[in-house]
Image (spheres, rainbow, N blue to C red):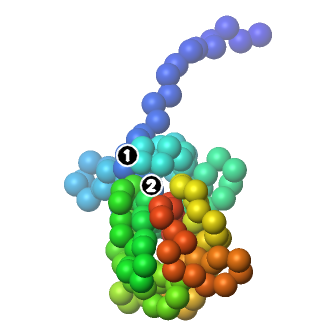
Amino acid sequence: MCNDDKFVRMIMKRGEGIPTIPSSDDHRNGDWLDTDIYRGEWYQDTLTGKVYTRNDADEITSPDGSIAPTSVFDAIISQSSTGAPTIDHLILDTIGGAFSYSAVGTYPYTKAGGFPNAGKVSMYVQQTSDFDGDVRAGVSSADVVLFRSEFTGSPSDDVISTIRVTIEVFA
Protein backbone atom coordinates (compact mmCIF):
# COMPACT_ATOMS: atom_id res chain seq x y z
CA MET A 1 0.00 0.00 0.00
CA CYS A 2 1.32 3.40 -0.95
CA ASN A 3 1.11 6.24 1.54
CA ASP A 4 2.66 8.81 -0.79
CA ASP A 5 -0.62 10.20 -2.18
CA LYS A 6 -0.53 13.98 -2.49
CA PHE A 7 -3.17 16.54 -3.18
CA VAL A 8 -2.01 19.20 -5.63
CA ARG A 9 -3.64 21.95 -7.65
CA MET A 10 -3.50 21.82 -11.40
CA ILE A 11 -3.37 25.22 -13.05
CA MET A 12 -4.98 25.49 -16.47
CA LYS A 13 -3.59 28.04 -18.89
CA ARG A 14 -6.18 30.57 -20.00
CA GLY A 15 -6.19 33.12 -22.80
CA GLU A 16 -8.21 34.84 -25.48
CA GLY A 17 -8.53 32.71 -28.59
CA ILE A 18 -7.73 29.21 -29.72
CA PRO A 19 -4.52 27.66 -28.34
CA THR A 20 -1.58 27.39 -30.69
CA ILE A 21 1.50 25.22 -31.16
CA PRO A 22 4.71 27.17 -30.47
CA SER A 23 7.48 27.58 -33.01
CA SER A 24 10.07 26.35 -30.47
CA ASP A 25 10.18 24.06 -27.43
CA ASP A 26 11.47 26.77 -25.05
CA HIS A 27 8.85 29.13 -23.63
CA ARG A 28 11.63 31.36 -22.24
CA ASN A 29 13.30 32.35 -25.52
CA GLY A 30 10.82 35.13 -26.36
CA ASP A 31 9.12 33.64 -29.42
CA TRP A 32 6.12 32.06 -27.66
CA LEU A 33 2.63 33.54 -28.08
CA ASP A 34 0.26 33.89 -25.13
CA THR A 35 -1.81 31.09 -26.68
CA ASP A 36 1.08 28.60 -27.16
CA ILE A 37 0.82 25.39 -25.09
CA TYR A 38 3.03 22.39 -24.30
CA ARG A 39 2.03 18.79 -25.11
CA GLY A 40 -0.37 17.61 -22.40
CA GLU A 41 -1.11 21.13 -21.17
CA TRP A 42 -4.74 22.21 -20.81
CA TYR A 43 -5.94 25.59 -22.05
CA GLN A 44 -9.22 27.48 -21.76
CA ASP A 45 -10.30 30.04 -24.36
CA THR A 46 -11.77 32.78 -22.15
CA LEU A 47 -13.78 34.21 -25.07
CA THR A 48 -15.78 31.02 -25.67
CA GLY A 49 -15.20 29.00 -22.49
CA LYS A 50 -14.00 26.02 -24.57
CA VAL A 51 -11.19 23.85 -23.19
CA TYR A 52 -8.40 22.34 -25.29
CA THR A 53 -5.23 20.26 -24.91
CA ARG A 54 -2.26 19.51 -27.17
CA ASN A 55 -1.62 15.82 -27.84
CA ASP A 56 1.59 13.99 -28.76
CA ALA A 57 0.75 14.27 -32.47
CA ASP A 58 0.88 18.08 -32.13
CA GLU A 59 -2.85 18.52 -32.63
CA ILE A 60 -4.94 20.83 -30.51
CA THR A 61 -8.04 18.91 -29.42
CA SER A 62 -11.04 19.38 -27.19
CA PRO A 63 -11.93 16.85 -24.46
CA ASP A 64 -14.23 14.93 -26.81
CA GLY A 65 -11.24 14.29 -29.09
CA SER A 66 -12.30 16.62 -31.87
CA ILE A 67 -9.54 18.69 -33.44
CA ALA A 68 -9.70 22.40 -32.65
CA PRO A 69 -10.07 24.96 -35.42
CA THR A 70 -6.98 26.92 -36.42
CA SER A 71 -8.93 30.17 -36.81
CA VAL A 72 -12.39 31.41 -35.89
CA PHE A 73 -14.84 34.21 -36.56
CA ASP A 74 -17.58 34.48 -33.94
CA ALA A 75 -19.91 37.47 -33.72
CA ILE A 76 -23.43 38.71 -33.19
CA ILE A 77 -24.51 40.36 -36.42
CA SER A 78 -27.57 42.12 -37.77
CA GLN A 79 -28.82 42.75 -41.28
CA SER A 80 -31.67 44.68 -42.88
CA SER A 81 -32.94 45.38 -46.38
CA THR A 82 -30.20 44.80 -48.98
CA GLY A 83 -27.26 45.92 -46.85
CA ALA A 84 -24.28 43.80 -45.88
CA PRO A 85 -24.51 42.34 -42.37
CA THR A 86 -23.01 44.51 -39.67
CA ILE A 87 -21.14 43.26 -36.63
CA ASP A 88 -22.95 44.27 -33.46
CA HIS A 89 -20.71 42.37 -31.04
CA LEU A 90 -17.42 40.79 -32.08
CA ILE A 91 -16.58 37.81 -29.87
CA LEU A 92 -13.49 36.58 -31.73
CA ASP A 93 -11.95 37.09 -35.17
CA THR A 94 -8.74 35.37 -36.16
CA ILE A 95 -9.82 34.95 -39.81
CA GLY A 96 -10.04 38.55 -41.02
CA GLY A 97 -12.77 38.27 -43.65
CA ALA A 98 -15.74 40.51 -44.40
CA PHE A 99 -19.48 40.14 -45.05
CA SER A 100 -21.29 41.50 -48.10
CA TYR A 101 -24.70 41.27 -49.76
CA SER A 102 -24.69 39.42 -53.10
CA ALA A 103 -28.30 38.52 -53.94
CA VAL A 104 -31.72 38.26 -52.33
CA GLY A 105 -31.16 36.74 -48.89
CA THR A 106 -27.53 35.80 -49.63
CA TYR A 107 -24.66 37.09 -47.47
CA PRO A 108 -21.12 35.90 -48.30
CA TYR A 109 -18.19 36.07 -45.89
CA THR A 110 -15.05 36.40 -47.99
CA LYS A 111 -11.46 36.02 -46.88
CA ALA A 112 -8.80 37.70 -49.02
CA GLY A 113 -6.52 35.00 -50.39
CA GLY A 114 -9.12 32.34 -49.64
CA PHE A 115 -9.35 29.68 -46.98
CA PRO A 116 -6.33 27.36 -47.12
CA ASN A 117 -8.49 24.23 -46.81
CA ALA A 118 -11.90 25.02 -48.29
CA GLY A 119 -13.15 21.54 -47.41
CA LYS A 120 -12.31 22.15 -43.77
CA VAL A 121 -14.34 25.30 -43.16
CA SER A 122 -17.62 25.27 -41.30
CA MET A 123 -20.16 27.97 -40.58
CA TYR A 124 -22.86 27.87 -37.93
CA VAL A 125 -25.73 30.28 -37.53
CA GLN A 126 -27.77 30.64 -34.36
CA GLN A 127 -30.91 32.70 -34.08
CA THR A 128 -30.74 35.23 -31.26
CA SER A 129 -34.04 36.99 -31.95
CA ASP A 130 -37.47 35.96 -33.16
CA PHE A 131 -38.16 36.01 -36.88
CA ASP A 132 -40.38 34.11 -39.27
CA GLY A 133 -37.83 32.41 -41.45
CA ASP A 134 -34.82 30.18 -41.70
CA VAL A 135 -31.11 30.86 -41.96
CA ARG A 136 -28.89 28.32 -43.69
CA ALA A 137 -25.09 28.34 -43.80
CA GLY A 138 -22.54 26.66 -46.01
CA VAL A 139 -19.25 26.76 -47.91
CA SER A 140 -19.59 28.32 -51.35
CA SER A 141 -16.04 28.20 -52.73
CA ALA A 142 -12.37 28.22 -51.72
CA ASP A 143 -12.60 31.82 -50.51
CA VAL A 144 -16.29 32.25 -49.58
CA VAL A 145 -18.64 30.89 -46.95
CA LEU A 146 -22.13 32.27 -46.85
CA PHE A 147 -25.47 32.19 -45.18
CA ARG A 148 -28.89 32.60 -46.70
CA SER A 149 -32.09 33.85 -45.17
CA GLU A 150 -35.31 32.25 -46.34
CA PHE A 151 -38.98 32.81 -45.79
CA THR A 152 -41.36 29.94 -46.62
CA GLY A 153 -38.54 28.18 -48.48
CA SER A 154 -37.50 31.05 -50.76
CA PRO A 155 -34.56 33.46 -50.40
CA SER A 156 -35.75 36.64 -48.73
CA ASP A 157 -34.36 39.95 -47.50
CA ASP A 158 -35.50 41.50 -44.22
CA VAL A 159 -35.88 38.12 -42.49
CA ILE A 160 -32.89 38.47 -40.17
CA SER A 161 -32.70 40.99 -37.40
CA THR A 162 -29.93 39.57 -35.20
CA ILE A 163 -28.06 36.24 -35.38
CA ARG A 164 -24.84 34.73 -34.07
CA VAL A 165 -22.46 33.53 -36.78
CA THR A 166 -19.51 31.24 -36.08
CA ILE A 167 -17.03 30.29 -38.80
CA GLU A 168 -14.31 27.74 -38.02
CA VAL A 169 -11.30 26.88 -40.20
CA PHE A 170 -9.44 23.61 -39.60
CA ALA A 171 -5.93 22.62 -40.67
Label 2: how many residues lie within 10 Å, few (<14), some (14-19) or many (20+)? many
- For image coordinates 51% across by 62% down, the residue present is 163
- For image coordinates 65% across by 70% down, the residue present is 134
Front in this rendered view, residue 84 or 22: 84
113 to 2, vertically: above or below: below
Front in this rendered view, residue 169 or 84: 84
Amino acid type at image mark 2 = Pro
x, y percent for residue 76? 43, 59
Q: Is residue 103 visible?
A: yes
Q: Which mark is residue 15?
A: 1
Q: Residue 5: which quarter of the image?
A: top right
Please state if 29 lies on the left or on the right of 59 as rendered: left
Q: Quadrant of the C terminus?
A: bottom right
Badges 2 and 1: C-beta atoms under 8 Å apart?
Answer: yes
- Count numbered badges in the picture: 2
x, y percent for residue 168? 53, 68
Q: Which residue is mark 2?
A: 19
Find numbered disc 2 in the image and state the secondary structure of the residue it sits on. Answer: loop
- For image coordinates 26% across by 48% down, the residue present is 28
Q: Residue 36: which quarter of the image?
A: bottom left
Please state if 48 lies on the left or on the right of 5 as rendered: left
Find numbered disc 1 in the image and state the secondary structure of the residue it sits on. Answer: strand
x, y percent for residue 74? 45, 61
Amino acid type at image mark 1 = Gly
x, y percent for residue 12? 46, 36
Q: Residue 51: which quarter of the image?
A: top right
Disc 2 to disc 1, how far (Cα)? Answer: 8 Å
Please state if 64 lies on the left or on the right of 97 as rendered: right
Front in this rendered view, residue 101 or 3: 101
152 to 24, vertically: above or below: below
Q: Which mark is residue 164?
A: none
Q: Quadrant of the N terminus?
A: top right
